[in-house]
Amino acid sequence: MKRYEQRYGNRYGTPSRTPDAEPSGTRSGKQAGKRSGTARRVAVAAVVAGGLLLAGCSAGTPDSSRNGADKAPMRPAPAPPNPNGGPAASAAPDDGAAKDSSGDAQKHSQAVPSYLSTFALDVDTASYGYARRTLAGGRLPAADTVRQEEFVNSFRQDYPQPEGDGFTVTTDGARTDGEGIGTKSETNGDDKGGVKGTDSAGSWSLLRVGLATRSAQSGNRPPAAMTFVVDVSGSMAEPGRLDLVKQALGSSIDALRPEDSLAIVTFSGEARVELPMTRLGSVESRGRIHSVVDGLEPRDETNLAAGVQAGYNEAVKAARPGVTNRVVLLSDGLANSGDTTAAAILDRIGTARRDHGITLFGVGVSSQYGDKLMEQLADKGDGHTSYVAEPEAARRLFTEQLPANVDLRARDAKAQVAFDPQTVSEYRLIGFDDRTVANGDFRNDAVDGGEVGPGHTVTALYSVHLKPGASGHVATATVRWLDPSTRAPHEQSGTVEAAALTSPLWTAAPKRLQVDALAAYFADWLRNRGDADRLPGAPGLPALAEHATTLASSTEDPAVRELSQAVTQARHLAG
């Protein structure tokens, strides 16, 4: 049975290691699951001996699924934790176990078959926002700033929401090959349209796993203590940068409730507390806060570390039971003095994050943007990032979208998808490259996951190669999270059958799935343009532009029209 690397080349490094090959002890504590480096693109192992175990929850029976997972027959699912506290139990593979790119079988006596895909949830959207800004400025974005999952996260979904905290799990998909638009040659580099990676021995499909939290109820969230850490360094003097931040702050001041509190810290060469934590209860308080914001001016160098540390110091002072405590960093991420790495900056605030549960929301601005630093700070600071380039986007972020960026529905959320080796020969997770978690750490709550607020959705897309004549069960998707208040673990699962993956993507699949596919394939083109390392079933840029135009018209969604404009801009820039 072939691995993805064997079929399309060994561009992804060595094959994915199992938990036995990479024990959780190799990466310590809460940071182990956040950023593990290279993405895992793996093939499903051959039929495993002795059967497969049904998922079990270490804290009790998982929640029943709205998709009927609780009524489904026994299928491959995440392996339950070892009762002795070691790695997750697993069935041993037979002689057809997954092989690495050299063809040698993995030499681990109790290796977990590679039918599991595990990752921390990610609700970031900054990569897409920054790509749009870059394209509008007449440049293609740098490949290392493009993250497929953040493109997909940027679009509205229609997943059902749960009644309480936690998630619903929705699964569906479509066929991506054999739609009558031609097959792209994998040897001549022709990128004039068509699909890539079709195979007569079975078919490629796109599998979607959609997770959704319940939206915020009007007037029903806990009080919030918001500490805004504002970059006023010399780089923010570029026309429009600091003005955009000030407009965003003004919108937030007006949108927060009387019982909420707000503090403002600025930083350039050093950090200043411009406003200690102040309750917004009266008109006079709001007026005083607006005056502080209006008086912000750019100064000199960028000591981002000093600003973040001062912001967390203010947030700790305001920490009290029943209050959501969040630091909001507004910056271009171009640190040039003091500590300039995410690890060093996070070391300064480790106690505040761990002991007080203070989360970080990063908001990027400017055409010159330190994407990697802002992403690492937010991800490892138990938060997420967004990017704004115009006043209307800033207003939406700090008004309509404010509850989703303040409150929490789930902590340390992870997903694990178990593919059925009877029906699936290969699969590839699209994106989440830096979010992979060791399969055996799925239920290790000491390993960090993602923090998810109300009304958020997370969409994971997989390229899946079904075996010829495949029918029945394809995969079981399980999400695990901790209650934001009690930190009790919960799980929810959903399943998908082969019949759900047979409709042609661009002509018969739901419009929202088509939009997700368009966003993912566009990000894939931006990352791998002119490269053989495209996703199976990925159309070329001209075909993507046609699909984008059609979807912009049929959905009548302004966000899809913006995506269509971005694809068109990329096509013109590509020549």
Image (tube, grey):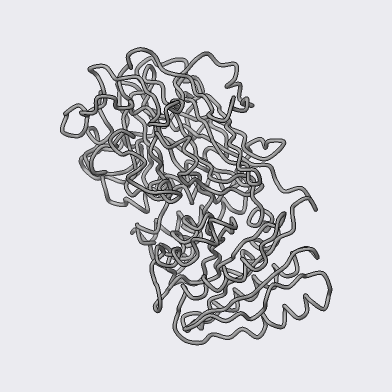
Q: Is residue 302 visible?
A: yes
Name the residue nearer the viewer: 189 or 433: 433
Question: Where does the C terminus fall, quadrant-wise?
Answer: bottom left
Q: Residue at x 64, y 26 (%)?
A: 66
Q: Residue 53, position in %: x, y?
A: 44, 19
Q: Residue 240, position in %: x, y?
A: 56, 78
* Residue 315 position (above or below residue 523): below
| Residue 8 falls in image quadrant | top left
Q: Residue 105, position in %: x, y?
A: 20, 26
Q: Residue at x 26, y 30 (%)?
A: 3
Name the residue nearer the viewer: 486 or 374: 486
| Residue 510 falls in image quadrant | top right
Q: Residue at x 69, y 70 (%)?
A: 262
* Residue 328 position (above or below residue 528): below
* Residue 246 position (above or below residue 175): below
Left or right of 51 on screen, residue 14:
left
Q: Residue at x 64, y 70 (%)?
A: 248
Left or right of 325 on screen, residue 182:
left
Question: Where does the N terminus fall, quadrant-wise?
Answer: top left
Q: Residue 376, position in %: x, y?
A: 43, 59
